[in-house]
Amino acid sequence: GEQYQQSLELVSFLQSLEETAASTEGIMLCGDFNSLSLFRSVQTIQSSFEGGIVDTWCEKGIDMGGKNGSICRVKGCTFPVSCPLMRLDYIFWRKNKNGRDGDDGEDGLVLKCVFVLAGGEEKGEQLKYASDHLPLCAIFTIMS
């Protein structure tokens, strides 16, 4: 339905940017997609670029571990904050038109790691969050 239509519009917009760009720079797309990875909307984004677009969590996700072994921490899941069991937030990255990412010693971004930033309880009080999703974070290095 609506999420699929939005993914088609987003892909069309990103492809138009890529076609008009004078450089071969990559694309980074981040956000709350409110879709599981098996949903058509996410699969459309992943399959719509020649050479593909990387789901950074799948490439370099780091599990920071659960709180006291709780089942409420599933790898990469960001929703809901109180017991994250769904992975709805993504950082997609298309390295560049040539498929290079700087790992081979050339200029570019190198993806180091991706993680969900989750706090525990401090002094018996639950931490406050600005969203109903936990933050998904990626660390990149610029090679030049």
Image (cartoon, rainbow, N blue to C red):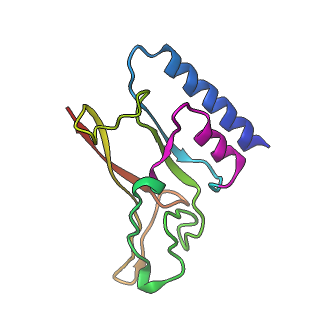
Q: Position of residue 28 (x, y in %)?
A: 45, 37
Magenta highlight on residue 39: yes
Q: Quadrant of the N terminus?
A: top right
Residue at x-position 54% and y-position 53% = 89
Q: Residue furthest left?
A: 144
> Is residue 52 found left or right of 120 in the rendered image?
right
132 versus 55 height, above or below:
below
In this rendering, would 7 be left or right of 128?
Answer: right
The answer to whether residue 88 is left or right of residue 61 is: right
Q: Position of residue 22 (x, y in %)?
A: 41, 13
Magenta residue span: 38-56
Name the residue rendered at 76%, 41% in the picture: 2
Quarter of image, res 63: bottom left
Q: Nearer the viewer, residue 133 or 73?
A: 73
Instruction: Tell me: residue 87, above or below residue 14.
Output: below
Residue pictured at 62% horizontal, 54% vertical: 37
